Image: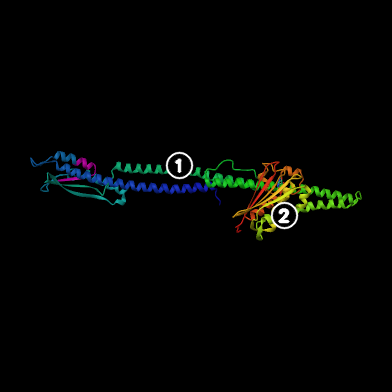
Amino acid sequence: MKRKLSTQLSLGFALIVLVTVALISLAANVLINHQFEKYVKNQQKEFSDGLAAGLSDQYDPADNGWNLDYIHGFGMYALNDGYIIKVYDADKQVVWDAENHDMTFCHQIMSDIRLRMLEQKPELKGDFITYHYELKQSDALVGYADISYYSPYYFNENAFLFVDSLNQILLVIGLLSLIGAVAAGIILAKHISSPIVKTIEITREISDGNYSVRFASEVRIKELNELAQAVNHMAGMLGEQDALRKRLTTDVAHELRTPLANVSSYLEALIEGVWDPTPERLQHCYDELGRISSIISDLERLRQIEDENLILNREPLDLLELSKGVCLAFEPEFAKKRLTCLIEGESSIISGDKGRLNQVVFNLLSNAVKYSVEGGQIRIQVKDSAANGTLLVEDSGMGIPENDLPHIFERFYRTDRSRNRKTGGAGIGLTIAKAIVQAHSGKITVKSEEGNGTQFIVELPKNDTC
Ligand code: ADP
Protein backbone atom coordinates (compact mmCIF):
# COMPACT_ATOMS: atom_id res chain seq x y z
CA MET A 1 0.00 0.00 0.00
CA LYS A 2 1.36 3.42 -0.93
CA ARG A 3 1.26 6.04 1.83
CA LYS A 4 1.11 9.79 1.38
CA LEU A 5 4.41 11.60 1.93
CA SER A 6 2.94 13.73 4.72
CA THR A 7 1.58 10.61 6.49
CA GLN A 8 4.91 8.86 6.08
CA LEU A 9 6.84 11.86 7.47
CA SER A 10 4.38 12.37 10.36
CA LEU A 11 4.56 8.69 11.30
CA GLY A 12 8.36 8.81 11.09
CA PHE A 13 8.53 11.87 13.34
CA ALA A 14 6.01 10.36 15.77
CA LEU A 15 8.02 7.14 16.01
CA ILE A 16 11.31 8.98 16.60
CA VAL A 17 9.70 11.20 19.24
CA LEU A 18 7.97 8.26 20.89
CA VAL A 19 11.23 6.35 21.24
CA THR A 20 13.11 9.47 22.40
CA VAL A 21 10.49 10.48 24.95
CA ALA A 22 10.21 6.90 26.22
CA LEU A 23 14.00 6.63 26.62
CA ILE A 24 14.28 10.02 28.33
CA SER A 25 11.38 9.24 30.69
CA LEU A 26 12.84 5.85 31.51
CA ALA A 27 16.31 7.27 32.13
CA ALA A 28 14.89 10.13 34.24
CA ASN A 29 12.75 7.69 36.18
CA VAL A 30 15.61 5.30 36.92
CA LEU A 31 17.99 8.14 37.78
CA ILE A 32 15.59 10.03 40.04
CA ASN A 33 14.47 6.85 41.81
CA HIS A 34 18.06 5.79 42.35
CA GLN A 35 19.02 9.20 43.76
CA PHE A 36 15.96 9.27 45.96
CA GLU A 37 16.73 5.81 47.35
CA LYS A 38 20.28 6.90 48.08
CA TYR A 39 19.00 10.02 49.80
CA VAL A 40 16.52 8.04 51.93
CA LYS A 41 19.23 5.55 52.88
CA ASN A 42 21.55 8.34 54.05
CA GLN A 43 18.73 10.06 55.89
CA GLN A 44 17.91 6.86 57.76
CA LYS A 45 21.54 6.29 58.68
CA GLU A 46 21.87 9.89 59.88
CA PHE A 47 18.64 9.63 61.84
CA SER A 48 19.85 6.45 63.51
CA ASP A 49 23.23 8.08 64.39
CA GLY A 50 21.32 11.09 65.71
CA LEU A 51 19.21 8.82 67.90
CA ALA A 52 22.33 7.23 69.40
CA ALA A 53 23.85 10.64 70.11
CA GLY A 54 20.59 11.79 71.72
CA LEU A 55 20.51 8.68 73.93
CA SER A 56 24.08 9.25 75.14
CA ASP A 57 23.01 12.62 76.49
CA GLN A 58 20.32 10.99 78.67
CA TYR A 59 22.89 9.55 81.04
CA ASP A 60 23.59 11.68 84.11
CA PRO A 61 27.04 10.78 85.49
CA ALA A 62 26.39 12.84 88.62
CA ASP A 63 23.79 10.46 90.01
CA ASN A 64 24.87 7.54 87.77
CA GLY A 65 21.36 7.28 86.32
CA TRP A 66 19.39 7.56 83.09
CA ASN A 67 16.61 10.01 82.26
CA LEU A 68 14.07 7.25 81.60
CA ASP A 69 11.15 9.60 80.85
CA TYR A 70 13.09 11.22 78.10
CA ILE A 71 14.38 7.89 76.72
CA HIS A 72 10.82 6.61 76.71
CA GLY A 73 9.56 9.64 74.72
CA PHE A 74 12.52 9.34 72.40
CA GLY A 75 12.00 5.61 71.86
CA MET A 76 8.25 5.92 71.16
CA TYR A 77 8.85 8.76 68.72
CA ALA A 78 11.50 6.66 66.92
CA LEU A 79 9.26 3.59 66.97
CA ASN A 80 6.55 5.50 65.12
CA ASP A 81 9.13 6.14 62.40
CA GLY A 82 10.19 2.44 62.26
CA TYR A 83 13.24 2.50 64.57
CA ILE A 84 13.27 -0.02 67.37
CA ILE A 85 15.56 1.04 70.19
CA LYS A 86 17.11 -0.93 73.01
CA VAL A 87 19.33 0.91 75.56
CA TYR A 88 21.86 -0.76 77.85
CA ASP A 89 24.04 0.72 80.59
CA ALA A 90 27.84 0.31 80.63
CA ASP A 91 27.39 -3.14 82.28
CA LYS A 92 25.13 -4.24 79.41
CA GLN A 93 22.03 -4.26 81.67
CA VAL A 94 18.89 -3.29 79.75
CA VAL A 95 17.83 0.28 80.61
CA TRP A 96 14.94 0.60 78.15
CA ASP A 97 13.62 -1.75 75.47
CA ALA A 98 10.91 -0.75 72.97
CA GLU A 99 9.88 -4.40 72.45
CA ASN A 100 9.53 -4.97 76.19
CA HIS A 101 7.67 -1.75 76.54
CA ASP A 102 5.05 -2.35 73.83
CA MET A 103 5.68 -5.60 72.04
CA THR A 104 2.40 -5.58 70.07
CA PHE A 105 2.96 -2.10 68.73
CA CYS A 106 6.57 -2.95 67.84
CA HIS A 107 5.56 -6.03 65.90
CA GLN A 108 2.72 -4.14 64.30
CA ILE A 109 5.11 -1.45 63.04
CA MET A 110 7.67 -4.03 61.84
CA SER A 111 5.12 -6.13 59.97
CA ASP A 112 3.56 -2.99 58.40
CA ILE A 113 6.94 -1.88 57.08
CA ARG A 114 7.88 -5.39 55.89
CA LEU A 115 4.54 -5.81 54.12
CA ARG A 116 4.65 -2.40 52.46
CA MET A 117 8.22 -2.86 51.24
CA LEU A 118 7.57 -6.39 50.03
CA GLU A 119 4.55 -5.20 48.08
CA GLN A 120 6.14 -2.11 46.57
CA LYS A 121 9.80 -3.12 46.31
CA PRO A 122 10.00 -6.90 46.29
CA GLU A 123 13.32 -6.77 44.41
CA LEU A 124 14.97 -5.04 47.40
CA LYS A 125 14.80 -8.20 49.58
CA GLY A 126 15.35 -6.09 52.70
CA ASP A 127 14.72 -6.85 56.40
CA PHE A 128 15.19 -5.35 59.87
CA ILE A 129 18.84 -5.12 60.79
CA THR A 130 20.15 -4.12 64.20
CA TYR A 131 22.99 -1.59 64.42
CA HIS A 132 25.06 -1.48 67.59
CA TYR A 133 26.21 1.82 69.08
CA GLU A 134 28.45 2.66 71.99
CA LEU A 135 26.99 5.56 73.98
CA LYS A 136 29.72 7.93 75.11
CA GLN A 137 30.00 11.19 76.97
CA SER A 138 33.37 13.04 76.53
CA ASP A 139 34.94 9.81 75.34
CA ALA A 140 33.77 7.92 78.42
CA LEU A 141 31.58 4.90 77.70
CA VAL A 142 28.22 5.31 79.42
CA GLY A 143 26.22 2.55 77.75
CA TYR A 144 25.14 0.81 74.57
CA ALA A 145 22.21 1.08 72.17
CA ASP A 146 20.78 -1.34 69.60
CA ILE A 147 18.83 0.44 66.89
CA SER A 148 16.96 -1.78 64.39
CA TYR A 149 15.36 -0.51 61.20
CA TYR A 150 14.44 -1.89 57.81
CA SER A 151 17.59 -1.99 55.62
CA PRO A 152 19.03 -1.13 53.18
CA TYR A 153 16.25 1.49 53.35
CA TYR A 154 12.51 1.78 53.56
CA PHE A 155 9.87 4.16 52.29
CA ASN A 156 7.14 5.48 54.48
CA GLU A 157 3.71 6.42 53.05
CA ASN A 158 4.88 9.94 52.13
CA ALA A 159 7.96 8.66 50.31
CA PHE A 160 5.84 6.30 48.27
CA LEU A 161 3.43 9.13 47.49
CA PHE A 162 6.37 11.30 46.42
CA VAL A 163 7.77 8.60 44.10
CA ASP A 164 4.31 7.94 42.63
CA SER A 165 3.60 11.59 41.90
CA LEU A 166 7.10 11.98 40.42
CA ASN A 167 6.38 9.09 38.04
CA GLN A 168 3.02 10.60 37.16
CA ILE A 169 4.61 13.99 36.41
CA LEU A 170 7.18 12.28 34.18
CA LEU A 171 4.39 10.43 32.38
CA VAL A 172 2.39 13.64 31.83
CA ILE A 173 5.52 15.47 30.58
CA GLY A 174 6.23 12.54 28.25
CA LEU A 175 2.68 12.53 26.89
CA LEU A 176 2.61 16.31 26.44
CA SER A 177 5.96 16.30 24.60
CA LEU A 178 4.71 13.43 22.47
CA ILE A 179 1.56 15.34 21.49
CA GLY A 180 3.59 18.54 20.90
CA ALA A 181 6.19 16.73 18.85
CA VAL A 182 3.61 14.88 16.76
CA ALA A 183 1.83 18.21 16.08
CA ALA A 184 5.17 19.84 15.15
CA GLY A 185 5.96 16.78 13.00
CA ILE A 186 2.64 17.08 11.16
CA ILE A 187 3.25 20.79 10.51
CA LEU A 188 6.81 20.13 9.34
CA ALA A 189 5.69 17.22 7.18
CA LYS A 190 3.05 19.46 5.58
CA HIS A 191 5.73 22.11 5.06
CA ILE A 192 7.94 19.64 3.22
CA SER A 193 5.26 17.77 1.37
CA SER A 194 3.15 20.68 0.12
CA PRO A 195 5.77 21.97 -2.41
CA ILE A 196 6.22 18.39 -3.59
CA VAL A 197 2.47 17.96 -3.98
CA LYS A 198 2.39 21.30 -5.81
CA THR A 199 5.24 20.08 -8.07
CA ILE A 200 3.19 17.00 -8.92
CA GLU A 201 0.17 19.18 -9.76
CA ILE A 202 2.27 21.51 -11.88
CA THR A 203 4.06 18.72 -13.77
CA ARG A 204 0.66 17.08 -14.39
CA GLU A 205 -0.61 20.34 -15.84
CA ILE A 206 2.54 20.64 -17.94
CA SER A 207 2.07 17.11 -19.26
CA ASP A 208 -1.50 18.14 -20.18
CA GLY A 209 -0.01 20.94 -22.27
CA ASN A 210 -0.51 23.91 -19.93
CA TYR A 211 2.94 25.52 -19.96
CA SER A 212 1.89 28.76 -18.27
CA VAL A 213 1.67 27.20 -14.77
CA ARG A 214 4.35 28.31 -12.30
CA PHE A 215 5.24 28.19 -8.60
CA ALA A 216 4.01 31.62 -7.58
CA SER A 217 5.97 32.04 -4.36
CA GLU A 218 9.40 31.10 -3.03
CA VAL A 219 9.66 27.80 -1.17
CA ARG A 220 11.56 28.20 2.14
CA ILE A 221 13.48 24.90 1.94
CA LYS A 222 16.55 25.40 -0.27
CA GLU A 223 16.48 22.13 -2.23
CA LEU A 224 12.71 22.28 -2.71
CA ASN A 225 13.01 25.88 -3.85
CA GLU A 226 15.58 24.75 -6.42
CA LEU A 227 13.17 22.02 -7.50
CA ALA A 228 10.39 24.61 -7.87
CA GLN A 229 12.68 26.91 -9.87
CA ALA A 230 13.73 23.98 -12.08
CA VAL A 231 10.08 23.10 -12.71
CA ASN A 232 9.33 26.77 -13.51
CA HIS A 233 12.30 26.84 -15.87
CA MET A 234 11.21 23.58 -17.49
CA ALA A 235 7.66 24.92 -17.96
CA GLY A 236 9.11 28.09 -19.49
CA MET A 237 11.37 26.14 -21.85
CA LEU A 238 8.57 23.78 -22.87
CA GLY A 239 6.29 26.77 -23.43
CA GLU A 240 8.92 28.39 -25.65
CA GLN A 241 9.50 25.15 -27.54
CA ASP A 242 5.78 24.74 -27.99
CA ALA A 243 5.44 28.29 -29.26
CA LEU A 244 8.36 27.70 -31.63
CA ARG A 245 6.84 24.47 -32.87
CA LYS A 246 3.53 26.20 -33.52
CA ARG A 247 5.31 29.07 -35.20
CA LEU A 248 7.27 26.57 -37.31
CA THR A 249 4.06 25.04 -38.60
CA THR A 250 2.59 28.47 -39.38
CA ASP A 251 5.84 29.76 -40.88
CA VAL A 252 6.51 26.72 -42.99
CA ALA A 253 2.91 26.73 -44.23
CA HIS A 254 3.15 30.46 -44.86
CA GLU A 255 6.52 30.26 -46.61
CA LEU A 256 5.46 27.36 -48.80
CA ARG A 257 1.96 28.58 -49.62
CA THR A 258 2.97 31.63 -51.70
CA PRO A 259 5.45 29.95 -54.09
CA LEU A 260 3.20 26.88 -54.37
CA ALA A 261 0.14 29.05 -55.18
CA ASN A 262 2.19 30.94 -57.75
CA VAL A 263 3.46 27.77 -59.42
CA SER A 264 0.02 26.16 -59.51
CA SER A 265 -1.72 29.25 -60.96
CA TYR A 266 1.04 29.55 -63.61
CA LEU A 267 0.77 25.86 -64.51
CA GLU A 268 -3.04 26.06 -64.59
CA ALA A 269 -2.90 29.00 -67.02
CA LEU A 270 -0.36 27.16 -69.17
CA ILE A 271 -2.42 23.92 -69.20
CA GLU A 272 -5.63 25.74 -70.07
CA GLY A 273 -3.80 27.55 -72.87
CA VAL A 274 -4.48 30.98 -71.34
CA TRP A 275 -0.71 31.60 -71.36
CA ASP A 276 2.00 30.52 -73.71
CA PRO A 277 4.88 28.69 -72.03
CA THR A 278 7.42 31.44 -72.66
CA PRO A 279 10.98 30.95 -71.25
CA GLU A 280 10.36 33.80 -68.71
CA ARG A 281 7.19 32.14 -67.38
CA LEU A 282 8.90 28.75 -67.12
CA GLN A 283 11.87 30.43 -65.42
CA HIS A 284 9.51 32.02 -62.90
CA CYS A 285 7.99 28.63 -62.12
CA TYR A 286 11.50 27.25 -61.76
CA ASP A 287 12.53 30.05 -59.38
CA GLU A 288 9.47 29.48 -57.20
CA LEU A 289 10.24 25.78 -57.01
CA GLY A 290 13.82 26.76 -56.08
CA ARG A 291 12.45 28.83 -53.15
CA ILE A 292 10.44 25.87 -51.95
CA SER A 293 13.38 23.48 -52.16
CA SER A 294 15.69 25.98 -50.39
CA ILE A 295 13.23 26.21 -47.45
CA ILE A 296 13.05 22.42 -47.32
CA SER A 297 16.84 22.04 -47.41
CA ASP A 298 17.13 24.70 -44.67
CA LEU A 299 14.80 22.62 -42.53
CA GLU A 300 16.76 19.46 -43.24
CA ARG A 301 20.03 21.16 -42.42
CA LEU A 302 18.63 22.41 -39.14
CA ARG A 303 17.50 18.92 -38.19
CA GLN A 304 20.98 17.58 -38.97
CA ILE A 305 22.72 20.35 -37.04
CA GLU A 306 20.43 20.02 -34.06
CA ASP A 307 21.04 16.30 -34.01
CA GLU A 308 22.95 15.71 -30.79
CA ASN A 309 26.05 14.22 -32.36
CA LEU A 310 27.17 16.87 -34.77
CA ILE A 311 30.35 15.30 -36.14
CA LEU A 312 33.02 17.80 -37.12
CA ASN A 313 35.70 16.99 -39.69
CA ARG A 314 38.37 19.21 -38.28
CA GLU A 315 41.34 20.57 -40.18
CA PRO A 316 43.52 23.67 -39.79
CA LEU A 317 41.64 26.57 -41.33
CA ASP A 318 42.49 30.20 -42.00
CA LEU A 319 39.40 32.28 -41.16
CA LEU A 320 40.59 35.05 -43.52
CA GLU A 321 40.92 32.66 -46.48
CA LEU A 322 37.60 31.06 -45.63
CA SER A 323 35.83 34.44 -45.59
CA LYS A 324 37.40 35.46 -48.89
CA GLY A 325 36.16 32.23 -50.50
CA VAL A 326 32.58 32.77 -49.32
CA CYS A 327 32.66 36.42 -50.42
CA LEU A 328 33.57 35.37 -53.95
CA ALA A 329 30.36 33.32 -54.16
CA PHE A 330 28.41 36.44 -53.22
CA GLU A 331 29.83 38.70 -55.96
CA PRO A 332 26.68 38.47 -58.13
CA GLU A 333 24.49 39.34 -55.11
CA PHE A 334 26.73 42.30 -54.20
CA ALA A 335 26.52 43.50 -57.76
CA LYS A 336 22.72 43.16 -57.85
CA LYS A 337 22.34 45.49 -54.82
CA ARG A 338 25.42 47.58 -55.60
CA LEU A 339 26.96 46.62 -52.31
CA THR A 340 30.65 47.02 -51.51
CA CYS A 341 32.29 44.29 -49.50
CA LEU A 342 35.52 44.91 -47.64
CA ILE A 343 37.62 42.11 -46.17
CA GLU A 344 40.33 43.14 -43.75
CA GLY A 345 42.36 41.78 -40.85
CA GLU A 346 44.97 39.11 -40.40
CA SER A 347 45.27 35.38 -40.92
CA SER A 348 43.93 33.35 -38.03
CA ILE A 349 44.41 29.59 -38.09
CA ILE A 350 41.97 27.54 -36.10
CA SER A 351 41.01 23.88 -36.11
CA GLY A 352 37.50 23.52 -37.56
CA ASP A 353 35.14 21.87 -39.99
CA LYS A 354 35.52 23.72 -43.27
CA GLY A 355 32.09 22.87 -44.67
CA ARG A 356 30.30 23.87 -41.46
CA LEU A 357 32.24 27.10 -40.92
CA ASN A 358 31.67 28.02 -44.58
CA GLN A 359 27.98 27.66 -43.75
CA VAL A 360 28.34 30.10 -40.80
CA VAL A 361 30.04 32.78 -42.91
CA PHE A 362 27.57 32.11 -45.73
CA ASN A 363 24.54 32.58 -43.46
CA LEU A 364 25.95 35.78 -41.91
CA LEU A 365 26.87 37.25 -45.31
CA SER A 366 23.56 36.22 -46.81
CA ASN A 367 21.76 38.10 -43.99
CA ALA A 368 24.06 41.10 -44.42
CA VAL A 369 23.08 41.18 -48.09
CA LYS A 370 19.38 40.54 -47.45
CA TYR A 371 19.04 43.24 -44.83
CA SER A 372 21.27 45.85 -46.45
CA VAL A 373 19.84 48.74 -48.36
CA GLU A 374 20.98 49.24 -51.93
CA GLY A 375 24.45 50.74 -52.25
CA GLY A 376 25.29 49.74 -48.66
CA GLN A 377 28.55 48.52 -47.23
CA ILE A 378 29.54 45.16 -45.82
CA ARG A 379 32.75 44.69 -43.85
CA ILE A 380 34.37 41.43 -42.83
CA GLN A 381 37.19 41.54 -40.33
CA VAL A 382 39.37 38.72 -39.01
CA LYS A 383 41.31 39.14 -35.74
CA ASP A 384 43.85 36.76 -34.32
CA SER A 385 44.86 36.20 -30.69
CA ALA A 386 46.76 33.46 -28.86
CA ALA A 387 43.55 31.79 -27.76
CA ASN A 388 40.96 32.70 -30.40
CA GLY A 389 40.23 33.47 -33.98
CA THR A 390 37.55 36.16 -34.30
CA LEU A 391 35.38 36.93 -37.28
CA LEU A 392 33.26 40.09 -37.55
CA VAL A 393 30.57 40.49 -40.19
CA GLU A 394 29.22 44.02 -40.25
CA ASP A 395 26.63 45.68 -42.47
CA SER A 396 25.18 49.15 -42.74
CA GLY A 397 21.65 47.84 -43.20
CA MET A 398 18.34 48.18 -41.41
CA GLY A 399 19.55 46.84 -38.06
CA ILE A 400 17.59 44.80 -35.55
CA PRO A 401 15.09 46.26 -33.02
CA GLU A 402 16.36 45.97 -29.45
CA ASN A 403 13.56 43.72 -28.26
CA ASP A 404 14.16 41.26 -31.12
CA LEU A 405 17.89 40.96 -30.37
CA PRO A 406 17.62 38.28 -27.62
CA HIS A 407 15.55 36.05 -29.93
CA ILE A 408 17.18 36.16 -33.34
CA PHE A 409 19.18 32.96 -32.72
CA GLU A 410 16.02 31.04 -31.90
CA ARG A 411 14.58 28.69 -34.47
CA PHE A 412 12.18 30.34 -36.94
CA TYR A 413 12.47 33.72 -35.30
CA ARG A 414 12.13 36.57 -37.75
CA THR A 415 11.62 40.21 -36.97
CA ASP A 416 8.40 41.72 -38.29
CA ARG A 417 10.33 44.02 -40.57
CA SER A 418 12.17 41.13 -42.25
CA ARG A 419 8.90 39.26 -42.62
CA ASN A 420 7.25 42.26 -44.28
CA ARG A 421 10.15 42.56 -46.69
CA LYS A 422 9.59 38.98 -47.87
CA THR A 423 13.31 38.45 -47.89
CA GLY A 424 12.87 34.68 -47.90
CA GLY A 425 14.39 32.32 -45.37
CA ALA A 426 12.48 30.66 -42.60
CA GLY A 427 14.39 32.27 -39.71
CA ILE A 428 16.81 29.41 -39.15
CA GLY A 429 20.04 30.72 -40.72
CA LEU A 430 21.27 32.14 -37.41
CA THR A 431 20.11 29.07 -35.46
CA ILE A 432 22.25 26.92 -37.76
CA ALA A 433 25.21 29.33 -37.44
CA LYS A 434 24.96 29.31 -33.64
CA ALA A 435 24.74 25.51 -33.43
CA ILE A 436 27.87 25.14 -35.61
CA VAL A 437 29.83 27.75 -33.61
CA GLN A 438 28.85 26.07 -30.34
CA ALA A 439 29.90 22.67 -31.70
CA HIS A 440 33.33 24.28 -32.15
CA SER A 441 33.12 25.46 -28.50
CA GLY A 442 32.96 29.03 -29.73
CA LYS A 443 30.41 31.77 -29.25
CA ILE A 444 28.45 34.06 -31.53
CA THR A 445 27.12 37.44 -30.42
CA VAL A 446 25.37 40.33 -32.08
CA LYS A 447 25.41 44.11 -31.75
CA SER A 448 22.86 46.12 -33.61
CA GLU A 449 20.97 49.37 -33.59
CA GLU A 450 17.78 49.78 -35.52
CA GLY A 451 18.50 51.71 -38.74
CA ASN A 452 22.25 51.72 -38.11
CA GLY A 453 23.49 48.34 -39.23
CA THR A 454 24.37 45.10 -37.54
CA GLN A 455 27.57 43.40 -36.39
CA PHE A 456 27.91 39.66 -35.77
CA ILE A 457 30.99 38.49 -33.84
CA VAL A 458 32.10 34.87 -34.02
CA GLU A 459 34.82 33.76 -31.60
CA LEU A 460 36.40 30.36 -32.16
CA PRO A 461 38.92 28.88 -29.72
CA LYS A 462 42.21 27.56 -31.10
CA ASN A 463 42.86 24.80 -28.60
CA ASP A 464 39.41 23.24 -28.55
CA THR A 465 39.86 19.54 -28.02
CA CYS A 466 36.20 18.52 -28.27
P1 ADP B 1 16.23 34.59 -42.04
O1 ADP B 1 16.24 33.42 -42.90
O2 ADP B 1 14.88 35.13 -41.75
O3 ADP B 1 17.20 35.61 -42.38
P2 ADP B 1 17.95 34.16 -39.76
O4 ADP B 1 17.91 33.14 -38.68
O5 ADP B 1 19.16 34.18 -40.56
O6 ADP B 1 16.65 33.97 -40.62
O7 ADP B 1 17.75 35.55 -39.06
C1 ADP B 1 16.72 35.72 -38.14
C2 ADP B 1 16.19 37.13 -38.14
O8 ADP B 1 17.20 38.01 -37.65
C3 ADP B 1 15.93 37.62 -39.53
O9 ADP B 1 14.62 37.29 -39.92
C4 ADP B 1 16.10 39.11 -39.40
O10 ADP B 1 14.93 39.67 -38.91
C5 ADP B 1 17.16 39.25 -38.32
N1 ADP B 1 18.50 39.49 -38.92
C6 ADP B 1 19.49 38.58 -39.10
N2 ADP B 1 20.60 39.15 -39.64
C7 ADP B 1 20.30 40.44 -39.80
C8 ADP B 1 21.02 41.58 -40.30
N3 ADP B 1 22.29 41.48 -40.74
N4 ADP B 1 20.40 42.79 -40.31
C9 ADP B 1 19.12 42.90 -39.84
N5 ADP B 1 18.38 41.88 -39.38
C10 ADP B 1 18.96 40.67 -39.33
Image quadrant of residue 198? top right
Which residue extends farthest right? 273
Q: Is residue 303 left or right of residue 133?
A: right
Position of the C terminus, as image quadrant, is bottom right
Residue 78 shows in this picture: yes
- Mark 2 neighbour density, 10 Å: few (under 14) some (14–19) many (20 or more): some
Q: Nearer the viewer, residue 339 or 175?
A: 339
- Label 1 sits on residue: 180
**Residue at 74% across / 54% down in the picture?**
328
- Label 2 sits on residue: 326
Check residue 374 for magenta coloring: no
Tag 2, which secondary structure?
helix
Q: Position of residue 253 (x, y in %)?
A: 76, 48
Q: Position of residue 259 (x, y in %)?
A: 81, 49
Which residue extends farthest left? 63
Q: Nearer the viewer, residue 337 or 257?
A: 337
Residue 102 shows in this picture: no
Residue type at mark 2 is Val
- Mark 1 neighbour density, 10 Å: few (under 14) some (14–19) many (20 or more): some
